[in-house]
Image: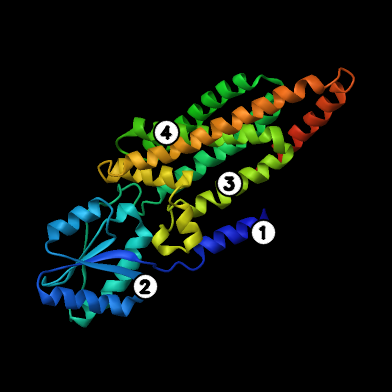
Amino acid sequence: MCVGMGLAYLGAFAAPEPHQLPVAVVGSGPEAKVFAQTVKDNAGDALDVRTLATRTDAVDQLRTRHLDGAYVLGDKPPELIVASAGSDTTVSAVEKIFTPVAAQQGEPLKVTDVAPPVGDDPTGQGLFFLLVALSIGSYASVAVLGGVGGALRMRTRALLVAAVSGVVALVGTAFAGPVFHLAHTNLWGLWGMAWVYSAGILLIGVGLHTFLKRWTTLAMMVLFVMLNFTSSGGIFRPELQNGFFGGLHTFWNGAGFVEGARSLLYFDHYGLGRYVWTLVAWLAVGAVVLAVAALAERRKRPSLTAAAAPPVEEEEAAEEEEEEEETVGV
């Protein structure tokens, strides 16, 4: 776990650099095109620079998350338009790029935020820590449902997964709403996404427990901490990460939850369907893993003799107790 956490967190967060960060220069005529090309030449692969004719076009593309920043030519002082609810760290990177550009024109940079987060979550990173809480509540429950529930029919364990994940989602939504006020609206939608997210983790974990036993904790840490938190986009979006974690962001369940929550709360549901389908796909994977585990247990059960059963049960009980003691939250 030490090696894995070090590689994952430092590999994802230690040296963030822009990679094809989508920005726009707003203006018309040859001047805007020359200016955009100059910015692109100076930035190299760090920026994906395009030109837009009007400020309205830039605002629309920021609110539909096609841009991370738009620099408006011709204004005094020059204006940089951003949408910080999408990622505060990305906005900081964009400001760092365009502040010297404005300084070369002898003017201070005016920053306009067209999609700010709520005042109770000024950095917009509260959704990431909500993801952490949901994840820990989910994979820690796997040790109980997979272990203690081993004597139950798989159908009963599946019903328990639905119930426990619903409670985990309810607790998370309470934190996001009335407790810390990260979300002022759409709490039912947030709860629904949290439920699907948590249920996917629990289904996968309970299914894997049939095969991995005490090693399930490590597997869950790899899947839903080391690879999940680092690729979620909650701290750095993929444009500031290397290709590995940026690639995971396109389909991992933590990214589906964080980006879906941002879409639900700040961006008029734009792209929400895609993120919900990501969560549903992970839920479906969990259902398949659980079904395979149920089949494996059904085939294994007749082979256990009455004489062999007590020692096996004692050994499994010891493993379950050890696994619950090893379960940690990071």
Residue 186 drawn at (x, y percent):
31, 34
What residue is shown with label 3? 223
- Residues at marks 3 and 2, CA–CA distance in whole angstroms: 31 Å
**Alpha-carbon neighbours of circle 3 within 10 Å: few (<14), some, or many (≥20)?**
some
Which is closer to the viewer, label 3 or label 2? 2
Q: Amino acid at mark 3?
A: Leu
Give the residue at x 73% y 39%: 214
Q: Are marks 3 and 2 in contact (CB under 8 Å)?
A: no
**Residue at left offset 52%, top offset 25%:** 162
CB within 8 Å, label 3 to label 4: no
Above or below residue 140? Residue 312 is: above
Q: Which mark is residue 3?
A: 1
Q: Position of residue 129 (x, y in %)?
A: 46, 47
From the top left corner, tell me how far across and down residue 158 is, in percent. Answer: 57, 24
Residue type pointed to by label 4: Ala
Q: Residues within 10 Å of mark 4 (few under 14, many from 20)?
A: some
Q: Pick whichever of labels 1 and 3 is earlier in the sequence.
A: 1
Q: CA distance from mark 1 to mark 3?
A: 15 Å
Which residue is tagged 2? 45
Query: Considering only order in the chain, which callout, 2 or 4, is on the residue closer to the N terminus?
Result: 2
**For this view, does 198 lie left or right of residue 152?**
left
SS for dot 4: helix
SS of the residue under disc 1: helix
Question: Dots 4 and 1: beta carbons under 8 Å?
Answer: no
The answer for how far apart the CA atoms under marks 3 and 4 are is 26 Å
The picture quadrant where one finds residue 256 is top left
Q: Indicate which disc residue 50 carries.
A: none
The reply, left or right, for residue 250 in relation to residue 53 is: right
